[in-house]
Amino acid sequence: MTESGAQAELLIAGGGIGGLAAALALTRQGAPVQLLEQAQAFTEVGAGIQLGPNVVRVLQGWGLQSALEAVAAWPQQLQARSALTGEVLARLPLGADIAQRYGAPYATVHRADLHSLLLAAVQSQGLASLKLQSVVQSFEEEPTGVRVSCVGENSAAQSLSAQALIGADGLWSRVRTLLLKDAPPRATGHLAYRVLVPQKILPHALRCQDVMVWMGEHMHGVQYPVCGGDWLNLVVLTESQLPADAQGWDLPRSPDAVAQDLRKALRGTCSPLQDLVRYMEGWRVWSLCERGIVQGAHHMAQGHVALLGDAAHPMLPYLAQGAGMAIEDAQVLASAWSERSLAVPQRLQHYAQQRWQRNARVQQRAQRNGQIFHSTGLMRVGRDWGLRSLGARLMDIPWLYGAQLSAGKP
């Protein structure tokens, strides 16, 4: 870990991708930060992440191009396929084609690899103090900042002060609960079955270096390469009835129960998809939960406290932009923080004003995609016809991939 002798200007709650992205963006602007992570180590779960060109541009701007190239895969196309027949309904060229349009390519990466490269970059900046086993309990606004009460290692009480507190502590954010006093996330009834395997153990016909979305009825699947293309990430998303309090990764599902769930969800789907699922072992099950759509800047910043990433605007994974929006948040937050002529609450409001509408739009689009991907009957027929007819024009998202963020200072 990097320990800074400088007094932290900001406290960041959460050491996941959003928290580390915020720490990196802020320290690149010369702002000392203290990051508080409740776990005993900086780790991430085994899952893949898609990074659109809007996100890759930010990472490149942070000097992470080489680090990303060392771990990412660079798919050449996105295929929309029928899970029922196996038909390729439409293709969106990626690779050089999308890089030419939007200034950066489309990447797919193992979540732990992205987390590790962000952590290494934060440590190399030398302006971050990283504290493990630190759990935020409460905060209190002060005239010139915020005082945060934490429980640290061995349950020791801590009191920390800074000019601002950034809640980047995920879907079940404690900082959000304290700030907004809203209800907890609610279960959607959708489950994500995720698995990662080395491509070399798969038959050649099942190996893949592109992004494929398999759309069926009440389900869909997504596969893409990670770890430089050496591993394949697969997620199958289904609709199921679970207890409302089901949350997080690793729901208690035995391998036999998972196999039974997937057989039921994939009934009537094509052989290539079923063959791929049968080859996979080591599934992890995640209950998808959500909050309401962001309604205004006040949902992302109040006073000396701001929210970032899933703490502010958790997103269903149907647009593959959850991590991306957290990284964009970090860039805009750092840019707003550099406006030293403004008081801290004004800087945080500037950040929130620039971000809330875009995040709300992505949240809404992700919700709509979930309905489209899982559609049945005439809606499914119309979906497939639209993809066959409009192809890449329907799959491309210029307002998302081409948006220019506040660059801030280098």
Image (cartoon, grey):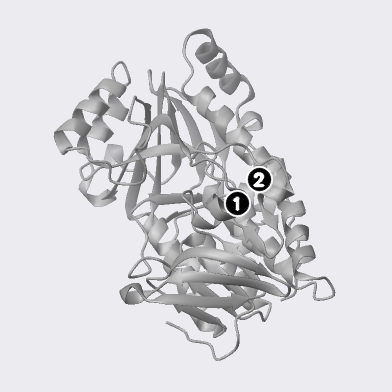
Seen from this angle, which residue lies furthest top? 378
Q: Does 267 sit left or right of 88 as displayed? A: left
The answer, for residue 63, to whether it is visible in the render is no
Task: Report which quarter residue 134 is drawn in.
Answer: bottom left
Which corner quadrant holds the C terminus? Answer: bottom right
Q: Does 9 sit left or right of 337 as displayed? A: left
Task: Report which quarter residue 292 is drawn in.
Answer: top right
Residue drawn at 45 percent across, 38 percent down? 289
Pointer 2 residue: 359
Residue drawn at 67 percent across, 38 percent down? 361
Position of residue 119 relative to residue 83, above or below, is below
Label 2 neighbour load within 10 Å: few <14, some 14-19, many 20+: many
Pointer 1 residue: 325
Inspect the image, locate mark 1, and give the three-letter code of the amino acid beneath it.
Met
Inspect the image, locate mark 2, and give the three-letter code of the amino acid beneath it.
Asn
Disc 1 is placed on an element classified as helix
Disc 2 is placed on an element classified as helix
Image location (x, y in percent) of residue 63? 60, 73
Image location (x, y in percent) of residue 4? 53, 87
Q: Along the line of sight, which residue is nearer the eye, 383 or 22?
A: 22
Image location (x, y in percent) of residue 335? 73, 67
Measure the alpha-carbon separation of dots 1 and 2: 7 Å
Label 1 neighbour load within 10 Å: few <14, some 14-19, many 20+: many
Q: Are marks 1 and 2 in contact (CB under 8 Å)?
A: yes
Seen from this angle, which residue lies furthest bottom? 5
